[in-house]
Image (cartoon, rainbow, N blue to C red):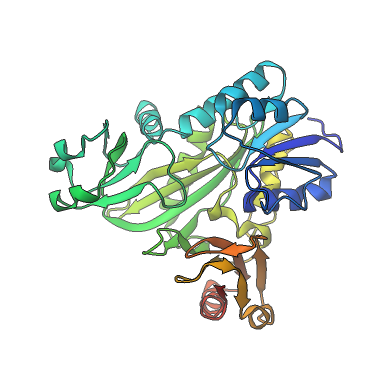
Amino acid sequence: MSYRPKTKLGILGGGQLGRMLIQETINLDIDVHVLDPDSDAPCRDIAHAFTNGSFKDYETVLAFGLGMDVLTIEIEHVNVDALEELQNQGVKVYPQPNVIRLIQDKGAQKEFYAKHRIPTSDYRLIGENEVNHHTDFFPVFQKLRRGGYDGKGVQSLKSADDISKAFSEPSVLEKAVDLEKELSVIVARNASGEVKTFPTVELEFNPVANLVEFLFSPASVTEEVEKTAQEIARTIADKLEIVGLLAVELFLDKTGNVLVNEIAPRPHNSGHQSIEGNYTSQFMQHVRAILNISLGNTEIVKPSVMVNVLGEDGYSGVANYEGLEEILAMKGVNVHLYGKRFTKPFRKMGHVTVIAETMEEAKSTAKKVQQTLKVKA
């Protein structure tokens, strides 16, 4: 393995994930170049170079990537054809284009799990306007095969009465799971084949926005569930032969089965607590993996709770953070604002990680943070 400073790292996407990646690359003296369609993207003012353009456009991605030593992503919805051409021309593209292409299609994901006997919920793949032919399979979650993101593109269909709110596009129908908990494991693999996982975390979702509201690290699960979750994450990373970070979202059902929900080939909301809560953050681990550096120690430093900072419902406009000074005075509170100028209902504006000697203490402080910090306009 070898690493040299001033490596030119290109990132497709200039949102909060790219922003937190850049914060880690500064310590390794890496030159980061960002491509994003939003001229006010959070990465704009902290990248070495910022290109305002579409990461979905073939020619734009090709021109951007040709000057890079390594190219990575912070969002899956990118032009894979351009990435394949860049790879053919000798640019290191991580995660690899074939991995991104698979993950862009939730139906292909499900077929990948079935092929490799990776446990997941029962499913059916359907074409355009075919939902009404599958009411015998209800209750289900309908997921668009392409384009879904951050809770969008997912619909609960409990009975035939819900057909009117179903998507018409090609979709996956996933049998509803009798859910006990939602879990996640972040796994990293470098080009040398070294693999490391982070301890399993537990997620609580906002029922309205379908976004993570709280994250608990470590998850409150049995040793058997922990072992199973870790093994599943490692198996997926090895079968994909991915280089980079992979978030493996999991269901724990009420009978103790661990099932794969979805995967994401990039830093993920379910790993944000690792910045303060683990010896190596998920962002530094991704950098290590794509530069083929030895992977870092993923052990937990202290129990932690991550709180997503979401825009308040009913407010749109220039963001105003109420209660910020109060939470900064609290013990163990670490604030991360994403540099987004405008808020809107349930937009991810930042996160707060609380670390403490015990999970109970961390949860108590996290509740106070959520009650105190409000993003309004």
Q: Quadrant of residue 88?
A: top right
Quarter of the image for the C terminus: give it.
bottom right
Residue at the image point whose x is 48% and y is 51% from the top: 184
Closest to the observer, 336 or 160: 160
Residue at the image point whose x is 82% and y is 50% from the top: 27
Residue 332, given in percent of the width and then of the height, sits at 66, 74
Q: Is residue 84 visible?
A: yes
Residue 320, given in percent of the width and then of the height, sits at 62, 74
Q: Quadrant of residue 321?
A: bottom right
Q: Is residue 261 above or below residue 214?
A: above
Q: Is residue 306 visible?
A: no
Residue 195, given in percent of the width and then of the height, sits at 61, 37
Q: In this view, does 72 lie above or below 43?
A: above
Residue at the image point whose x is 36% and y is 31% from the top: 117
Residue 173, given in percent of the width and then of the height, sits at 27, 40
Closest to the observer, 243 or 224: 243
Closest to the observer, 147 or 203: 147
> Left or right: where does residue 105 sit relative to residue 325?
left
Q: Quadrant of residue 375?
A: bottom right
